[in-house]
Amino acid sequence: MTASRAWDAPWRGSSRTMGEVLAERQGAVLHLTLSHPARRNALSLAMWQSLGAALQAASADASLRCVTIRGAAGHFAAGADIEEFPQVRASLQAVRRYHEDIIAPALDAIATCTHPTVALIEGVCVGGGLEIAAHCDVRLSCASARLGVPINRLGFPMAPDELSGLLALAGRALTLELLLEGRLLDAAEAYAKGLVARVVPEDTFAAEAALLVARIEAGAPLAARLNKALVRRLSAQVDPLGPAERAWAFSYADSRDHAEGVRAFLEHREPRFDGS
Amino acid sequence: MTASRAWDAPWRGSSRTMGEVLAERQGAVLHLTLSHPARRNALSLAMWQSLGAALQAASADASLRCVTIRGAAGHFAAGADIEEFPQVRASLQAVRRYHEDIIAPALDAIATCTHPTVALIEGVCVGGGLEIAAHCDVRLSCASARLGVPINRLGFPMAPDELSGLLALAGRALTLELLLEGRLLDAAEAYAKGLVARVVPEDTFAAEAALLVARIEAGAPLAARLNKALVRRLSAQVDPLGPAERAWAFSYADSRDHAEGVRAFLEHREPRFDGS
Amino acid sequence: MTASRAWDAPWRGSSRTMGEVLAERQGAVLHLTLSHPARRNALSLAMWQSLGAALQAASADASLRCVTIRGAAGHFAAGADIEEFPQVRASLQAVRRYHEDIIAPALDAIATCTHPTVALIEGVCVGGGLEIAAHCDVRLSCASARLGVPINRLGFPMAPDELSGLLALAGRALTLELLLEGRLLDAAEAYAKGLVARVVPEDTFAAEAALLVARIEAGAPLAARLNKALVRRLSAQVDPLGPAERAWAFSYADSRDHAEGVRAFLEHREPRFDGS
């Protein structure tokens, strides 16, 4: 599977091997599906780029009223596609490019989407999957969902542009709980902690999702857009990170433990961290 | 009913037709009641002004220790009195006057009240009703309560000075859920999502409200006032909107869909929004 | 008990009378125990100083991976040791020294600790106890816990450096509810309101605490430290208080009601506040 990847254009793989983002329009609603079924929709670089491009195109289409994001085959997304890391995220420079030039713009395209965005969460929704869901406006969860950010086992912290969206949704205490423990929450705990708007059983999930979208569609589009933009404008402010702070946020990239965490994952073994 | 209103002084109506805010003092506690029973206490311009004036007077009265706000006849408040809109909110200029000169000062008078403020919520608490409750310090909910902001069906977004108070209570995710879906939450869901401090059954609601007020009264007034002021001062900051941003926040006022939303409400029919 | 205290060095008392902070290291984890069992671990000035010093030493020890804080004998901490107040907190100047020079640095040492910090909460966790827990990264609660800030009965507000940490955890609405009512929350309500990450029964509390710490230990230390520091950096900002604002925040110290609240507590009687 990795043999088909070309180093000089790692995200140009075929949809069969690299995963893809499927788009289907129904009336005024755009349905996006994260699809990488063999890997529980683990997010390849190609998928991040497709997702960002799809959201940007949606924002420019004034005839839309709602965008949904879900995953294929019973899972939302299992986080980053770690199998790709040796190719696309193997040096400090590549780490920053991956997070700052690929993931950050995709999440920003979700957060700034003109239209209301809805994450429809089934099964695994972890790491980058939870980041995508966190940047949507409303999250509907199936009872099957498990949410979390187990990247402490991979030896790296959440990148700042990804963290800010999780913080805006989860607040400081829950964000630290998720990041420091790396534990997955089931749907009920995720609801109790405010990560999702509602939890519905599997057999009514599709119907509840349709009702949610219908309620959004029934509202005035201009009101929805202004509400979204005003909420962003009136949310608590944080000074943007400066260049030195960004360098600090990625200072782990050349560490032994970061390499060990990724290698252990790829070798299906427990990582051995020594703090260096 | 609208025949009695004069355009040049729309809030000078009689209390029978325009609604009123009743005030009753018991010891060191001021009890305010939103009363417009024929319209589930829908908030007329006259009521907003009375409410603001009552809170300002309360703040100046150092002998008080607590202010409660409730609604008459089993409801908190059903939001703005839409019947008034053709008279008092029919142009861009009137929309801004209504929100910036009438509602914003009333909510600010609640938020900056010297004394602890308690919202006692029964029945419908939507739109402007929820805004009032959100600006109080503590919210006690009866099991009968239903809370939400269904203004997406009216074709307009929440005004910025109103939105900031809801955001401070509900956070970004719940605020967007309420605004974009327009769904009402029952008391249990409102509690689970942090909109209210407690939910109590109808038959003990009055007794629990009295206990809550008694606990506040038992504390040192000076400590309560400093706690309130310090919490305000130490809450996350947002740059105030500039004039251009305020104009943008109200840019919907002359839109077709805004007119359609209000007209459809008054004609008791579904609105037909086309995004313009 | 008070006879052994010297005015000129009030925190130099013996551990038997003044309480102490016990430290025990197990592998890469430092376990701190607030111990003042005769007073449900009420926090003496000596204990605040020991706690701060322990956290600062822990931060400097790169071989640690986690710090836990608990209380001795079934309680976390019953707040400040009010018995000390006549000696250590009897004038405006002493009040500011107590809060700004003793408590604030101790809480800051927790909040800025290099390593993940876990509060293990049993029994009473009020006032200063809740402040300590709020400044930790993760809070595990035993079903026996009761949490709150009943200082309104003592006639003084929460000091600003203490309040900011509670606000960061609890948000504006819950902070005001706790401060204005002074009511204690049981573990279930504290969980529902986001004050603690989980509630576990007494008989599994120790085992769950060990699992929580093990999950933290299993992660890469560098990732944990960067996650902590980034969450701090990216949390909503507030302008620091200026000197005049600090003076205002402590302006209650010479009030009649403040003296009355402390005196009534020491005399085991209800306080009589008159607002002056």
Image (spheres, coloured by chain):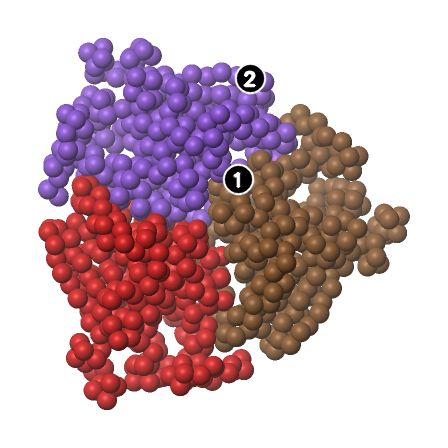
Chain colours: A brown, B red, C purple
Residue A81 drawn at (x, y percent): 74, 47
Q: Name the residue under label 2.
A: C26
Give left or right: position of C197 versus C96: right
Count neighbours of disc 2 (C-alpha within 10 A) and say few if under 14, some if 14 to 19, many if 20 or more. few
Chain of the residue under label 2: C
Q: Is mark 1 on a helix, strand or loop?
A: helix
Observer-nearest residue: A213 or B186?
A: B186
In the rendered image, which residue does mark 1 sit on?
Answer: A176
C87 displayed left or right of A273? left
Task: Judge whether A85 appears above or below C201 on screen.
Answer: below
Residue drawn at the location 46% of the way across and 17% of the way down: C23
The answer to whether tags 1 and 2 share a subunit is no
Pick whichever, C143 or C196, lies toward us. Answer: C143
Q: Examine the rendered structure and indicate whether residue C260 appears above or below residue B231.
A: above
In which image quadrant can residue C88 be found? Answer: top left
Expressed as whole percent of the image width and height from the top left, the position of residue C71 reads 40, 23
Task: Give the residue type at disc 1.
Answer: Leu
Q: Which amino acid does label 2 sit on?
A: Gln
Quadrant location of the N terminus of chain B? bottom left
Residue B267 higher or lower than C102, as above or below: below
- Helix, strand or loop at label 2? It is strand
Q: Nearer the viewer, residue A87 or A169?
A: A169
In the image, what residue occupies the spot 34% across and 65% down? B124
Q: In this view, does A161 lie to the left or right of C46?
A: right
- Asked if the residue under mark 2 is in contact with the one under mark 1, i.e. CB atoms within 8 Å, the reply is no
Q: Which of B122 and C120 is in front in this view?
A: B122
x 42%, y 72%: residue:
B151
Q: Going 52% across and 75% down the picture, which residue do you hit?
A: A218
